[in-house]
Image: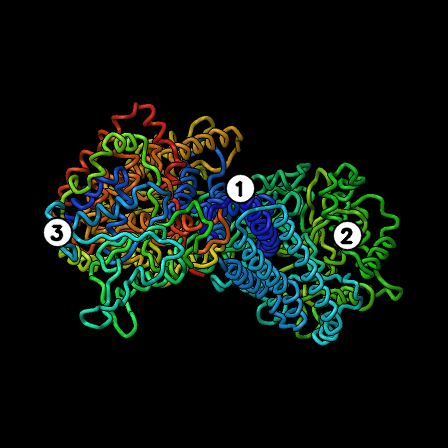
């Protein structure tokens, strides 16, 4: 856009200050918004914005100085691709998958910002395009959450919050860019004038904002009244818990997602009995004690958005311990682990690791549920007869407090449950206060919004918790308040789904929470959990809102098996106890109408035996149908949940006599396995078979190589399922164990060295490319052009620069031929003739070229000593000077 | 080297004309080629130079190199050559001193027209800025129209009519500087400037032979050759991108903030004519980017009015530089 003249350094500063900085500011806001709407694997908007800023500024400067777009962008993509690919080869042990995803995310942010920097530097009206893009983006972001309610208020608010700022940004950018365009030299006066304009602009925009908000305020209220967004107090202090916005049908597989929860509640009659999943959770407290069902967590809501009056997921919550993989995207038997959540869960007293099998039925396979702090997820096979009912299953590992149990949470008058709970409360009374907790954490989880409603909630909490000294007593005080009975012996609070407006019963917004707590005292889980959260926070107890599934122990004959129907979707709170971590608390009163409706416990799927060997390889030959054997060439696989990689390809013989042969569509016969087919074989650890056991000190590789052959195979998958193929590359490394900074440092340094080498090789690569072009061109016209480029590049790289005021012919005459005697001028004449004459080059011209090209390089290079030549060919800035984009001569 | 529609012999002749003049005007090969360019473009040239830089010698040498034309055969001169006349302009010079006048012929009892010095092939109009505007405009009309109107008679000048006007940049007192409209008629304005020290030495050593122009130089081309080459120069090929380049330069001068008056459309046409002729002078039948660069200053600079002295030094250069950059980086095929 401003490639027409030389950009001096002060001018560059002005550009950065007046154009790049505001854009960065806008993008900062946008990135924050995006972060709030979506949970990214990479938290921390600071680094995102930093990466964005660096990308944009670097690209902006480069393209302002007329770097070539396609070359530089290609190099950038190549570098990113190289790093992405080489992450898997870095030495040391760390989470390859996680790191590469993280890198992928950052590099896409970087690339986007690079493109934006390019646009700003080159295209005159790019800010307009950028703004259009942003508008679409915000529209898409908001369409999910906002327009769903179809409210005029929100539409106007959208205009006010999003449309106007973006329009202001466009106005500013176009205005400022045009001012800078006409600026030839930088002087103090001009800078002052620009700054003056900026201030004027800000004043105008500010007054427009104030004007619009003043104008909008009065009509907004009636709208709110009509559409039921009712804000009784205008101070903005309204409370509510809205889980509905987070819950919707998963568009990808048509199955239910936790986001469906609201709808499920809506039509209890039909949808209420849908079995979502069942889980096997072994009793970790010991064989004899009371069974320990646990609530299953989907996600946490921690951040209260005062603007929209509801709780939101917040990827930036301190110590984010949410483990949220997409189970279906993990390859079969691959263990996906993130142990950092254990550290971030901040509690290891009375904790232990518990494994749990989850069989998905109606629940979307993209959703992950697991009790307490999960840190590991491994898709497993389902026994064949159950595959129809439960197409997908995972084994998860969670870090769970011994204190936690559904019995610990149930609100029941049952004396045995009460006794069970008392033992645990006693332990928790050891926590007296939160004095030693770091302030940021405490502040985040105890901050309540301001406003009369919250004041009244706080007052209520103070009254309820007057006698409570320890945090656990405060929690119990709240629970007891909800359980308490009035003077007539009737329960004060009752469970009811029939609250709120008929058209939208799921939003427990401000007015409803007020109605719930102080008037009607009827509501369902989100009301109880929301009120509890505000009360506990007002008492200084760190607490968060949890969405997930209520576990009901129906004391069925299948011990350890729990069944989850769609109306078991639930919301409760987690309270933080230093040392113990986050513990579940449910303050919802029992539902006397609904809960006792009998629901069937199904037949639990047989638990498949544990696979001791899973290999994925290529059939070495056609299957031997007589001996029922198949030979497979293998390099990698999984041995008792551990990945292994054999030093060289090895042939394994499998006994397929008992194996089930299947492919994606269904059962197949063994003779369909042909040489060269890709085959996945699973062998189970069975008491009847002699199989190697994992032994400490022996690597999986050694054990696999030592295993007796033929190995008895249990399942043979032909033509591995698409999901298996894709993540193949990610299987290479043993997965996350310890993460070493040294590894990262050395790996990073190695990578950096490689990139540096690549960078300094650019001139040589360009030289070779030009040379081959010059040699291999067919037509004389092309040949002339490429010889010209080749020669000019070489001279340029040698530091014999052509002035921009010099024509190539003069350059050839004055600078080249006087030094090198390589007849460059004669060639230049031919080149100019080819370029400008209307006649084809004749024999003489072709002869000149034919003589010139082979004899060109030698006398030129002979003039230099080798080390000088090397130094010159490492100088990338000269290459840039040669390749940079020509100045544009645009007529305005 | 070239396969073209132009008689190869003409290249030879232009070369030898250049060499021939070079014997007299030493070390000024480019300037001499400019003069030849103006001649072949059927134009006129303005030399702005201090006294004693070889302006007259230049005109004389040119005239002596061309045989034929209006001149009288003079054996002492080595044969007939085109006529050369010189007029020293002074404030009291009248138009009729230039174009001639009607005088009374006793024998015919009638007025007859007595041709003035303008009826010649090569005219040296010395110190043109000393003459009154009346005389200047009379001369310029002749240059433009190639004819003279007196009363109801129109006298045609020779087809080969080439004016070398000079003006002295140092003494401006008592002069009538040429207005922009009239400067526009000159295809080029050049100045010789000082020669190098070596050439100076050479000239001083050989001034005796240099002064004897008649003996030093021969006639290398004929009157017919000049007319032929003038016509041929119009058939020199100009690539569309070069024409675009000329357009861009012209528009560049109009857009440049430091230039008050940019180049006219006529300037563009003249520029193209000069480019064609210059290509011919340089032994080519096509125009290259270097030609634009070499000619732009001499063809355009005197037509522009700059806002200040500083601008007059750099503005055209800036316009040109941008355009040259475009042309140089132009790819074959991007046509």
Task: Give the secondary structure at mark 1.
Answer: helix
Where's the C terminus of chain A, which quadrant?
bottom left
Q: Which mark sits nearer the N-terminus, 1 or 2?
A: 1
Residue found 32% across the figure and 31% down from its top = B197
Task: Give the secondary structure at mark 2.
Answer: helix
Q: Nearer the viewer, residue A17 or B298?
A: B298
Q: Residues within 10 Å of mark 2 (few under 14, many from 20)?
A: few
Q: Nearer the viewer, residue B241 or A281?
A: B241
Q: Is residue A498 above or below residue A673?
A: below
The label number, if any, that marks residue B80 in the structure image:
3
Q: Say which quarter of the image contains residue A794.
A: top left
Total of numbered circles in the picture? 3
Left or right: A584 in relation to B209:
right
Residue found 36% across the figure and 45% down from its top = B49
The label number, if any, that marks residue A415 in the structure image:
2
Q: Nearer the viewer, mark 3 or mark 2?
A: 3
- Indicate the colouring scheme: rainbow
- Tell me residue A503's x, y (percent): 66, 74
Q: Say which quarter of the image contains residue A159.
A: bottom right
CA separation in Å, label 1 and label 2: 80 Å
Residue found 35% across the figure and 56% down from its top = A664
Are the residues at dot 1 and dot 2 in contact (C-beta closer than 8 Å)?
no
Q: Mark 1 falls within which chain?
A: A
Q: Is residue B280 above or below residue A344?
A: below
Task: Give the secondary structure at mark 3.
Answer: loop
Q: Which residue is mark 1?
A: A9
Q: Mark 2 falls within which chain?
A: A
Are the residues at dot 3 and dot 1 in contact (C-beta closer than 8 Å)?
no
Q: Nearer the viewer, residue B98 or A710?
A: B98
- Tell me residue A521's x, y (percent): 79, 66
CA separation in Å, label 3 and label 1: 67 Å
């Amino acid at each position: 856009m401003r490639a027409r003249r030389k950009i001096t350094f002060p001018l560059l500063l002005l550009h950065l200050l007046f154009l790049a900085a505001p854009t960065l500011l806008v993008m900062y806001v946008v990135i924050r918004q995006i972060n709030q709407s979506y949970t990214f694997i990479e938290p921390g908007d600071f680094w995102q914005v930093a990466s964005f800023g660096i990308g944009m500024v670097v690209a902006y400067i480069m393209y302002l100085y007329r770097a070539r777009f396609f070359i530089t962008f290609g190099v950038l993509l190549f570098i990113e691709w190289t790093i992405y690919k080489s992450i898997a080869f870095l030495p040391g042990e760390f989470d390859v998958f996680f790191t590469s995803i993280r890198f992928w995310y950052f590099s896409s942010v970087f690339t986007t910002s690079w493109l934006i920097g390019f646009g700003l530097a080159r295209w005159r009206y790019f800010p307009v395009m950028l703004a259009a893009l942003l508008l679409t983006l915000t529209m898409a972001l908001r369409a999910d959450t906002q327009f769903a309610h179809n409210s005029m208020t929100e539409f106007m608010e959208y205009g006010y919050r999003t449309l106007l700022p973006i329009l202001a940004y466009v106005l500013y950018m176009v205005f400022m860019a045009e001012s800078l365009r006409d600026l030839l030299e930088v002087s103090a006066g001009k800078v002052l004038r620009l700054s003056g304009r900026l201030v004027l602009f800000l004043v105008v925009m500010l007054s427009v904002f104030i004007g619009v908000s003043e104008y909008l305020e009065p009509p907004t209220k009636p709208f709110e009244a009509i559409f039921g967004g009712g804000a009784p107090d205008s101070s903005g202090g309204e409370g509510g818990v809205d889980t509905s916005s987070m819950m919707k049908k998963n568009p990808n597989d048509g199955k239910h997602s936790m986001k469906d929860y609201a709808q499920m509640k809506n039509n209890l009659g039909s949808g209420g009995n849908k079995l979502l999943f069942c889980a096997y959770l072994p009793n970790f407290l010991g064989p004899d004690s009371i069974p320990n069902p646990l609530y299953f967590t989907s996600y946490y809501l921690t951040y209260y958005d005062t603007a929209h009056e509801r709780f939101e997921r917040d990827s930036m919550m301190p110590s984010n311990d949410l483990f949220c993989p997409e189970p279906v995207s993990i390859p079969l038997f691959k263990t996906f682990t993130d142990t950092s959540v254990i550290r971030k869960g901040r509690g290891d007293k009375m904790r232990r690791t518990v494994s749990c099998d989850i069989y998905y039925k109606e629940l979307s396979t993209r959703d992950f549920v697991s009790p307490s702090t999960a840190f590991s997820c491994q898709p497993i096979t389902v026994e064949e007869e159950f595959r129809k009912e439960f197409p997908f299953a995972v084994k998860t590992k969670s870090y769970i407090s011994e204190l936690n149990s559904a019995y610990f949470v149930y609100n029941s008058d049952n004396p045995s449950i009460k006794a069970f709970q008392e033992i645990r409360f006693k332990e928790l009374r050891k926590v007296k206060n939160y004095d030693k907790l770091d302030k940021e954490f405490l502040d985040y989880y105890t901050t309540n919004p301001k406003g009369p409603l919250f004041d009244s909630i706080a007052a209520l909490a103070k009254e309820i918790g007057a006698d409570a000294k320890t945090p656990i007593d405060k929690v119990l005080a709240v629970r007891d308040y909800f359980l308490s009975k009035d003077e007539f012996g009737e329960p004060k609070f009752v469970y009811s789904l029939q609250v709120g407006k008929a058209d939208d019963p799921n939003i427990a917004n401000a007015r409803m929470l007020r109605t719930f707590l102080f008037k009607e005292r009827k509501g369902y889980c989100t009301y109880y959990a929301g009120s509890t959260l505000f009360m506990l926070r007002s008492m200084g107890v760190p607490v968060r809102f949890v969405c997930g599934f209520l576990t009901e122990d129906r004391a069925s004959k299948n011990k350890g098996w729990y069944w989850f129907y769609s109306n078991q979707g639930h919301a409760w709170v987690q309270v933080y106890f230093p040392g113990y971590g986050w513990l579940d608390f449910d303050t919802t009163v029992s539902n006397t109408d609904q809960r006792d409706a009998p629901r069937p416990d199904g037949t639990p799927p047989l638990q498949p035996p544990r696979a001791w060997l899973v290999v994925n390889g290529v059939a070495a030959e056609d299957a031997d149908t007589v001996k029922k054997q198949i030979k497979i060439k293998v390099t990698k696989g999984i041995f008792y949940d551990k990945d292994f990689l054999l030093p060289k390809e090895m042939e394994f013989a499998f006994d397929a006599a008992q194996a089930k042969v299947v492919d994606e569509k269904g059962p197949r016969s063994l003779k369909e396995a042909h040489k060269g087919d890709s085959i996945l074989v699973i062998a189970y650890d069975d008491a009847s078979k002699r199989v190697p056991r994992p032994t400490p000190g022996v690597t999986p590789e050694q054990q696999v190589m030592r295993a007796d052959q033929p190995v008895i195979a249990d399942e043979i998958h032909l033509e591995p399922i698409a999901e298996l193929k894709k993540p193949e590359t990610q299987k290479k490394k043993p997965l996350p164990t310890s993460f070493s900074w040294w590894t990262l440092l050395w790996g990073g340094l190695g990578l950096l060295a490689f990139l540096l080498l690549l960078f300094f090789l650019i001139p040589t690569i360009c030289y070779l490319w030009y040379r081959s072009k010059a040699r291999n061109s067919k037509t004389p016209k092309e040949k002339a052009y490429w010889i010209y480029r080749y020669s000019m590049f070489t001279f340029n790289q040698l530091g014999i620069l052509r002035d921009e005021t010099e024509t190539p012919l003069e350059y050839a005459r004055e600078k080249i031929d006087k030094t090198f005697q390589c007849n460059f001028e004669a060639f230049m004449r031919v080149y100019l003739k080819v370029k400008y004459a209307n006649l084809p080059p004749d024999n003489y011209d072709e002869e000149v070229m034919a003589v010139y090209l082979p004899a060109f390089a030698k006398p030129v290079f002979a003039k230099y000593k080798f080390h000088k030549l090397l130094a010159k060919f490492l100088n990338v800035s000269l290459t840039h000077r040669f390749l940079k984009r020509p100045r544009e001569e645009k007529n305005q | 080297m070239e396969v073209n529609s132009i008689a190869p012999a003409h290249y030879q002749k232009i070369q030898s004309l250049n060499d021939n003049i070079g014997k007299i005007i030493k070390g000024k090969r480019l300037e001499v080629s400019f003069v030849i360019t103006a001649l072949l473009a059927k134009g006129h040239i303005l030399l702005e130079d201090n006294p004693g830089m070889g302006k007259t010698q230049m005109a004389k040498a040119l005239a002596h190199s061309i045989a034929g034309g209006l001149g009288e055969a003079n054996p002492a001169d080595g044969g007939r050559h085109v006529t050369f006349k010189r007029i020293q302009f002074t404030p009291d010079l009248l138009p009729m001193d230039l174009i001639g006048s009607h005088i009374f012929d006793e024998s015919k009892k009638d007025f007859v027209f007595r041709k003035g010095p303008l009826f010649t092939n090569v005219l040296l109009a010395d110190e043109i800025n000393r003459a009154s505007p009346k005389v200047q405009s009379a001369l310029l009309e002749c240059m433009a129209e190639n004819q003279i109107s007196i009363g109801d008679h129109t006298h045609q000048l020779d087809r080969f009519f080439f004016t070398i006007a000079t003006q002295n940049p140092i003494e401006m007192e008592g002069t009538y500087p040429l207005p922009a409209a009239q400067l526009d008629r000159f295809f080029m304005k050049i100045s010789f400037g000082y020669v190098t020290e070596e050439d100076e030495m050479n000239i001083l050593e050989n001034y005796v032979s240099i002064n004897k122009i008649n003996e030093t130089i021969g006639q290398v081309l004929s009157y017919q050759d000049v007319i032929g080459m003038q016509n041929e120069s119009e058939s020199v090929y100009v690539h569309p991108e070069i024409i675009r380049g000329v357009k861009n330069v012209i528009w560049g001068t109009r857009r440049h903030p430091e230039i008050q008056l940019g180049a006219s459309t006529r300037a563009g046409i003249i520029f193209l004519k000069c480019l064609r002729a210059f290509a011919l002078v340089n032994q080519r039948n096509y125009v290259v980017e270097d030609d634009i660069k070499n000619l732009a200053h001499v063809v355009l600079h005197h037509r522009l009015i700059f806002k200040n002295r500083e601008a007059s030094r750099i503005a055209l250069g800036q316009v040109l530089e941008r355009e040259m950059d475009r042309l140089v980086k132009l790819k074959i095929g991007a046509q």
